[in-house]
Image (cartoon, helix red, strand yellow):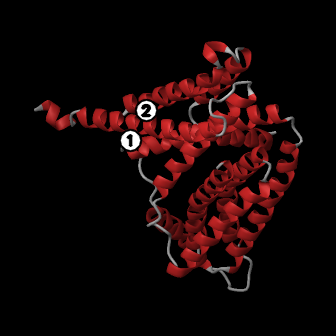
Amino acid sequence: MSASLLVVAAFLASAVEAVEALTIVLAVGVTRGWRSPLLGVSAALVVLAGIVAVLGPALTALPISTLRVFVGGLLLVFGLQWLRKAILRSSGLKALHDEDAIFREQAEHARAIGALAPARMDWYSFTIAFKGVLLEGLEVAFIVVTFGSNQGSIPLAAAGAAAAVVVVVAGGMAVRAPLSRVPENTLKYGVGLLLVTFGTFWGAEGAGADWPGSDAAILGLLVFYLAVSRVLVLLLTRSARAVPEPAAAAE
Amino acid sequence: MSRLAGLARFLYEFVVGDDITIAVGVVAALAVTAAFPNVGGGAFWIVPVVVVALLGVSVGRVARKG
C-alpha cells in the first residue's frame, strides 16, 4: 500500500507543479519563440536531476530512525503549508490558482520586452523558463527524494513524477494552451493530505512511537486528516458568510 | 554575502513558508514524542493532535484577519 501511495503522491505533486511550469513556458514560447525557453527547460531539468542524484544517496546514508524523524518533520512542515493553503482556497479565503490569468500576465510581459532577431539567443525567455521549471520542480524533487528515500525506492518515486510530467506536457501540446481545466486546487489539497499523512507516520515512528495496525495506520491517518480538513473548510465557510457586508451592516 | 542571505531567505520561505508556528509546533511534537514514547499507551497520537491544533490555529488566524 505504501509503495502505491508513494507513486500516487509523486505523480499528483508532479502533475500540479508541471501544470504551473507549463503555463510559464507556454507563455514565453508562444510569444517569443521556442528555442530559448526549451533550452531553459532542459537546463532546469538537468539541475533538478542533479539535486535528486546528490540528495537521494545522502539521505539514504542516514540511520533509518534519524531519516524518518528528519524526513517526517520536513514533510509535515511542507505538507501543512500545502494543506493550509488548500483549506483557505476551498473556503474562499484565498484566491484560487488561475492558469489562464497567469498565462495572460506572462505573455503580456513577454511581449512588452520587445521583439528579437530569430537566430539570437533570447536570454529573457531562457531565464523565465529556467526559473519557472526549477522553482516548480524543486517541490517535486523534494517530494521524490524524501518519499523515495524513506520507502527505499527513489527510482519509483521519480518514475511517478516523470509520468506526470509526460502526461501534462502531452496535454499541453495537444491543446496548445494552459491546462486550466486541470482541477489544480483539488490536486493540491490531495497532495497536502498525503504529505501530512506520511509526515505524521514517519515522523512519529522515527521518534519512537509504535503505530497501532502498523502500515494500515497510514490509511487511518489519511481519512482522519481528510475529515478534519473538511470540518475546517465548513467552519471557515460558515464564518465567512456570517460576516455582514459593510453596506448591509450600516443599513 | 547578499547572495548567501538571498539563498537562506529562499530556503526559509521554501521550507517554513509564511507561518513559523507550524514549523515550531512540528519540531516540538516530534521532540515530545521522542522524549515520552510510551506516554498514554503509546505516543503515536501526539503528532496528529498537534497537527490538527496547528492547522486550526493557522487557518483561524487568517480567517480573523479577513
Q: Label 2, secondary structure: give it.
A: helix
Tally of numbered tags: 2
The kind of residue on which mark 2 rests is: Val
Residue positioned most to the left: A251
**Answer yes or no: do the residues labelled 1 and 2 have beta carbons within 8 Å?**
yes
Residue A130: give x, y in percent of width and height.
Answer: 70, 64
Bin the neighbour count of mark 2 within 10 Å (Cα to Cα): few under 14, some 14-19, many 20 and up. Answer: few
The kind of residue on which mark 1 rests is: Leu
User: Is residue A113 visible in the rendered structure shown here?
Assistant: no
Residue drawn at (50%, 24%) of the image: B53
The chain to which mark 1 is attached is: A
Residue A235: give x, y in percent of width and height.
Answer: 34, 33
From the viewer's perspective, tell me whether residue A36 is left or right of residue A97: right
Residue drawn at (55%, 36%) of the image: A221
Q: Label 1, secondary structure: give it.
A: loop
Up the image or down, A30 lies above or below A70; here it is below
Residue positioned most to the front: A213
Up the image or down, A40 lies above or below B23; here it is below
Residue A223: give x, y in percent of width and height.
Answer: 49, 40
Q: Is the C terminus of chain A in the top left, top right, bottom left or bottom right quadrant?
A: top left
User: Is residue B4 visible in the rendered structure shown here?
Assistant: yes
The chain to which mark 2 is attached is: B
Q: Kindly report the distance in space between the C-alpha atoms of the residues bearing marks 1 and 2.
A: 8 Å
Residue drawn at (40%, 34%) of the image: A232
Question: In the image, which disc is placed on residue B62?
Answer: 2
Residue drawn at (65%, 20%) of the image: B43
Question: In the image, which disc is placed on residue A93?
Answer: 1
